[in-house]
Image (cartoon, rainbow, N blue to C red):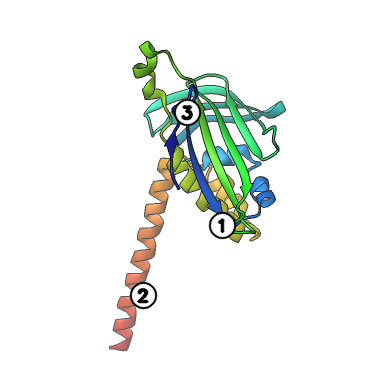
Amino acid sequence: MAEELSASADDAAWVSLSLTLAPQALQDMLCDVKVLLRVNPCLEFERLEQMPGGRLELAGRNDSNHQAFATGACYAARKDGRGFVLRYDSGIKRETHFEIAPALDRDPGGSVLTITEVYDTPAEAERERRLAEVDRSLVPWAAALRAHLLHHARWGNWPGYRWLVERFWLGMPPRQRRVARLIIWTTLLEFVVFVAVLAVYVAG
């Protein structure tokens, strides 16, 4: 996984993920844009609504750059048929592309997902001021998305799994998820310690 910045007229950042999923299966998993956005551990949404015609209304806070955001967006298939693109109505970030390609030599049955964020290039006088608007969540988002996709591929057919993850777990703000995860692991650790102490007591 690597992030790079282009030096072209359009500034961009991108990250590529190698996945053991067929391209069509990957495309099917990415079709729910609300889930796709909620997977990002840095975005806390106050509003995330899907409107008719592939339109979205987004509002909330980005913890990666400490900026509030509110914008409309359009989610549509890429012209080359190899994924999707999210186009924003406002803000320095203009588009997010999700490009899907066969893995070929890496894994004949797998795929490569490349997420590219394209930014407007502000005038030199505004460039320093607008750097604060740059979304720095791309790499953590990609890591969380990879884990989500692989877990979905493995457990997605289990009854109740999709509701539990996509509606309940991802329905919580990222901060609440972090707290819940800490509580779960602490509880499990306490249970393991309890079982170990009980086993020693019984054996003695």
Rendered-image quadrant of the C terminus:
bottom left
In the image, taking residue 131 as reference, residue 106 lies left or right, namely right
For disc 3, the neighbor class at 10 Å (few under 14, some 14 to 19, many from 20) is some
* 115 w.r.t. 54: above or below: below
Mark nearer the N terminus (1 vs 2): 1
* Circle 2/circle 3 CB separation < 8 Å: no
Tell me the residue at 64%/49% (across/down).
26
For disc 2, the neighbor class at 10 Å (few under 14, some 14 to 19, many from 20) is few
Q: Can residue 42 be seen in this view?
A: no
Q: Residue 60 carries which label?
A: 3
How many numbered marks does the figure carry?
Answer: 3
- Expressed as whole percent of the image width and height from the top left, the position of residue 63 reads 39, 33
Residue occupied by mark 2: 195
- Expressed as whole percent of the image width and height from the top left, the position of residue 181 reads 41, 52
In the image, taking residue 121 as reference, residue 192 lies left or right, namely left
Q: How far apart are marks 1 and 2 (CA)?
A: 44 Å
- Expressed as whole percent of the image width and height from the top left, the position of residue 176 reads 42, 43
Q: Residue 125 carries which label?
A: none
Q: Distance between the residues labelled 2 and 3?
A: 43 Å
